[in-house]
Image (cartoon, helix red, strand yellow):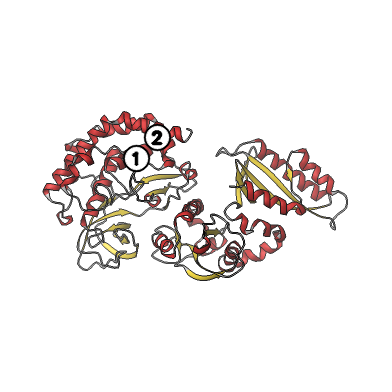
Amino acid sequence: MPRQGLGFKGEAHMTPGYFSLIQFCPDPSRLEAANIGVLLFCPSLGFLDVKFSEEYSKVKRFFGAKKIDFELIDSSKESLRARMRIMRQEVDSLEGLTKFIDTRANELKITKPRAIKINEPGRELESLYVELVQDNIVRRKKSNSIIPEIDRYFHHSSLTGRIRYNQKVVIPVVRREIKIPYAFQNGALNLITPQKFNMDSQGFQKALSLACEGDLLQKHQSIDGYQYKFIIIPVVDTTLGHDVSEEQIENVFKHYSIRIVKPAQLPSFIKEVEEIAH
Amino acid sequence: MSIADSNPWSPREFKRYVESFPTSTGVARVVTDAGEGYLKALGNREGPHALAREWLGTSLAKWIGLPTFDFTLIQVKSDDEIALGNGELAKTGTAFISRAEKGFTWGGDSEKLKSVVNSDIIPLLVTLDTLVLNVDRYSPLGHTRKPNYDNVFFVSLDGGGKKFRLVAMDYTHAFSCGTDLTSKIENIEFVQDKRAFGLFPQFIPFMNQAAVCAAHEKLAGLTSEIVSPIVEQLPDDWEVSAMVKVSLVKFLVQRADFMVRNLQNFLLFCDNAQTRLGI
């Protein structure tokens, strides 16, 4: 079967695969570790990908925040992601993956692969992450704050490897670091933010604030030389407030030349991302 | 004073085993009286010459000005129970040990190289790999060996942060492609091998003319007076014969000389490589 590269489409039957946990283990003598990611490998489908936790609440609880170099963990994760991109073309057997896993000598450890039957790899990776890695405490908070319907679009298997989650960026001029839920690279770094807006002055203020931040990002390059594009997915709650119209909120973003993708436009937007993201 | 003696890290005793890895030398992480280190010992799958190659390569890396892990020799005693990655126990005798440092191996991405504070050493790294015919980082044209990103290591800077330091590591496959060192090393085909070793495509943008010339200028200072003491430090139990030691000295001096004389061709090669990349 030809290699599927970063994504996988179709095939509803169950296929054998393997998964491993990725653990942060700061002291190999103690062998105490916190799960911070999961790896999924399906050789017959050419699927190999990792999903990491983007926050460190569990690591902080386990090991104490002061002792941990979080930048090092971030960089180690980035390197492992980059290695996965290379390994997708090279590794086509459990033996090859195991050899790689067994030779990891630093703070990120990967457990021995375990067998799993997979329906759709992208979704399975996501499920494994939720089940085995995601911090229970954070999970409760997440269900209140994230917009699940929109989140499902950006975790679709067709976008595996193309979307970055919780991308940290520093807003120029004000130098404030923020986390953008979804981002993809295409020449520019496209930053996608879904946001709920009430139809009142509070919602309007929020729109203004976001629009200004987006404008600053679009006008200035990042320190790494990236051009930014800011994309807003406005989710307007028409049941809350009535002083401000949906059109007014949209006009704020239009004034700052910020692209709006309405929730109803998400299917076609996702298709666009599939084609242009790398 | 040996190159190893000139660094401050001096473990003398094995205290505790931590873990080992199924690499070619079955390297083991151990706790010593001076902290943790990675130990390559006798009894490894590749044989004692793997340790000799590691010692020579790392010593030359230090000489040429490349950052290395602190390293030294340590004695494995008869009651030291150190499991190597091949399932065997380390044998009694001299072992090579390097200090464990926080960091991570390269993912192969060009972006990560931008986070390095000492990317100026890349031409030096390539020059040394070429000098010692190191096939186990990025092997040259005509070689089927895959790129080994695990042999490019990023060490955290003191105080943490997003910047890292690139470190030269692992020379166990230098000189003789993982086989035993012999006097054949001084044969002309090895001395005058024109290929570039260790030159990842991602390194090419860093191979600017000035830096390459500076690296070769350093090579011009590689004389037998520099090389002989390094070679002489090879412990007897690593079984490198006197004859092979003589050949190693000859090889290194002659090869360094050849590389200096071949500099223009090498610069042209780098230039063409950069042109192909659109740099």
Q: Position of residue B265 (x, y in %)?
A: 32, 30
A45 on left or right of A262: left
Label 1 packing within 10 angstroms: few (<14), some (14-19), many (20+): many
| Secondary structure at numbered mark 1 | helix
| Residue occupied by mark 1 | B126
Picture residue at 33% right of the left edge, 45% below the top: B142
Label 2 packing within 10 angstroms: few (<14), some (14-19), many (20+): many
Q: Position of residue A240 (x, y in %)?
A: 84, 57
Note whether residue A193 is visible: yes
| Secondary structure at numbered mark 2 | loop
Note whether residue A134 is visible: no
* Image quadrant where one finds the N terminus of chain B: top left
Q: Position of residue B233 (x, y in %)?
A: 17, 48
User: Of the residues shown, which amino acid type is indicated by label 1?
Assistant: Val
Q: Position of residue B64 (x, y in %)?
A: 29, 38
**Disc 1 to disc 2, C-alpha distance:** 9 Å
In the foreground, B18 or B272: B272
B164 on left or right of A12: left
In the foreground, A259 or A46: A46
B218 on left or right of B206: left
| Residue occupied by mark 2 | B207
Name of the residue lying farthest toward the right: A242
Task: Specify the quadrant of the image occupied by residue B27.
Answer: bottom left
Image marks 1 and 2: residues in contact by CB distance under 8 Å: yes
User: Of the residues shown, which amino acid type is indicated by label 2?
Assistant: Met
Q: Is residue B66 above or below residue A82?
A: above
Picture residue at 76% right of the left edge, 48% below the top: A206
